Image: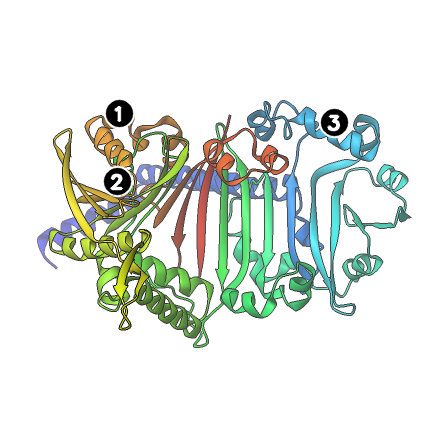
Amino acid sequence: MSDQNKHTFAQLQTEIFDPDSQFKISNTLGIVISILALAFLTIYGYLIVITIFQPQSIAKILPENHTVAFFELHHSIENPNSDKTFDLLQNHPLYSREAIISHIESTLDIDYSTQVKPWIGPKIGAAIIKNPSQGTANILYFAQIKNQQLATELYPTETNNYYSAVFSDYLLISSDQSTLDNILDENQTRLYTTPKFRRINTNLPINKTGFIYLDYQLIDNTVYNQLKLPFETIAPIFSRLGTEGIAIVSLDDKFLLQNFTALTPHSNGDTNLFTIPEQYTASMTSLLPSDTILFWGATNLDHQIRRFLESLMNQEISSDINQVIDLQISQLLGNNLDYQTDLLPLIANEFSFSIEIHQNQPQLKAIIQIDEEKQPTLQNIINKIVILSSQSQTQRISKTLPDGTYAEEIVLIEPQLFTTNSKYRNFSISTTTTTADDFSMHTTTIDDFTIISPEIALIHSSIDTHLSPQDSLANSAEFKLTTESLIGNIDQLTYYKIDDLLPLIMQNSEIQKYFQGLSALSSGKSYLNDGVTTQSYLTVE
């Protein structure tokens, strides 16, 4: 042993057997153990509290193999001081606390404060339950109860063609007695205990205002027939979807909607999706004006299509659909442009599609991050689109027939392409049109982004926004509020300006009123190895 090691060993012996050193070590160790014990008790206590006081999900009593879907709402109508949901909806004509209570009272002809409030618990909702023996699917309504006696007095077991029962701490109501019998059967495996539900539940927030659950594998011909949907056509498209859950969470200034879709394995047992390494940053929103009403952006169109198809269906069907797309593109743009080798490589970087209002009409704009050497291919595609969108002209031609008589023939004349260039605020704009002059496509380039639109005013708006970035969508308060937690953590982004978009797509005022007061929605999607997760943020006026 070296002299240094001997000295170290001797020092260690002294410290171990020195009473003062022992006290220091044991005292320090005691402090560490106390801190660890306190941390353990804090975490354990938190888990106990959320387990005891978190309202129990209806999934604890729903049958595993018969529950197609359910919606569960955690309400606090009677608690005006602590519920963020009604704080956000306080000005809404349909969803405010007062409006909901008024609707309940007028619809059921009851007094909420005396006939409902004394017994109703924090969870209400509805479920779709299959009845295999009858080949039907029925609606089950449920409400958590805090006073069973009051609940059963107000809702006898059979009244007005509805049947009711109390199971666990829930009042169950259905128009079909066998649906209730199905749930009351003690031999049923409860949905809450199954791996498929746990998989959904663990990927979503604990404290939820609302929750939607859907089992795609239980949507069979019975359900499709009742919904009047073509089973043979739709079912293969959703062959890879397993279960889906959507959580609604009330935040201080907006709603969070988070969903997770669990995927079933491929035939070879693989669940992995085609991966995209980079995260999307939505840089193109800096070229869009703040009044843009719809935006969808991502990177690499080929990757997005492949992953979307893989998430919905098996590999064989996905391959077939790709062939159909290839054929349709070839028929549309001609055989000299190939979908796989020309179109998809053109959009290999960032791209976006957006809608703006110009002269009270929605107009489309596309932005593509494109290399200079690919510009001729892009122009070729633009030429094809302009030709296809232009109306062919006719011309009368007089002819002398062999017998010396005259006749007129109507000849179809294909429009001829031509391109003009103009300037706007020192930016060059290229316009492709035809001799028919009934349709044009305009393009300009800012940095390495090519902006395309059939309306030149939308080209101008991007140039204006580039020169005045404070007026861009990226810097608008509402866009920031709904996307600040998304950008950089997602693969693609969708933004809706709901209050401006809805009047364009919903002319029926009866439907539109249910969305009144909703302001903006941003949605970001990420593809995981075994599922797809989407986070959306919704603001309310």
**Residue 331 in picture, x, y percent from top left:** 33, 66
Q: Answer whether residue 191 is visible to the viewer in this image.
A: yes
Disc on the earlier residue, 2 or 1 = 2
Callout 2: SS:
helix
- Amino acid type at circle 1 is Gln
The image quadrant that residue 271 belongs to is bottom left
Q: Give left or right: position of 119 versus 491.
A: right
**Residue 416 in picture, x, y percent from top left:** 21, 53
In this rendering, the answer to whether 100 lies above or below 30 is above
| Category of crowding for the residue at label 2, using alpha-carbon neighbours closer than 10 angstroms: few (below 14), some (14–19), many (at least 20) | some
Q: Residue at x 86, y 37 (%)?
A: 150
Number of the label disc, if any, that sits on residue 259: none
Query: What whole-number distance in Å separates the C-alpha atoms at marks 2 and 1?
Result: 14 Å
Question: Are the two marked residues, 3 and 1, in contact with CB atoms closer than 8 angstroms?
Answer: no
> To which residue does mark 1 refer?
470
The image quadrant that residue 356 belongs to is top left
> To which residue does mark 3 refer?
102
Callout 3: SS:
helix
- Amino acid type at circle 3 is Ser
User: Number of marks in the image?
Assistant: 3
> To which residue does mark 2 refer?
283
**Residue 118 in picture, x, y percent from top left:** 80, 31
Question: Are the two marked residues, 2 and 3, in contact with CB atoms closer than 8 angstroms?
Answer: no
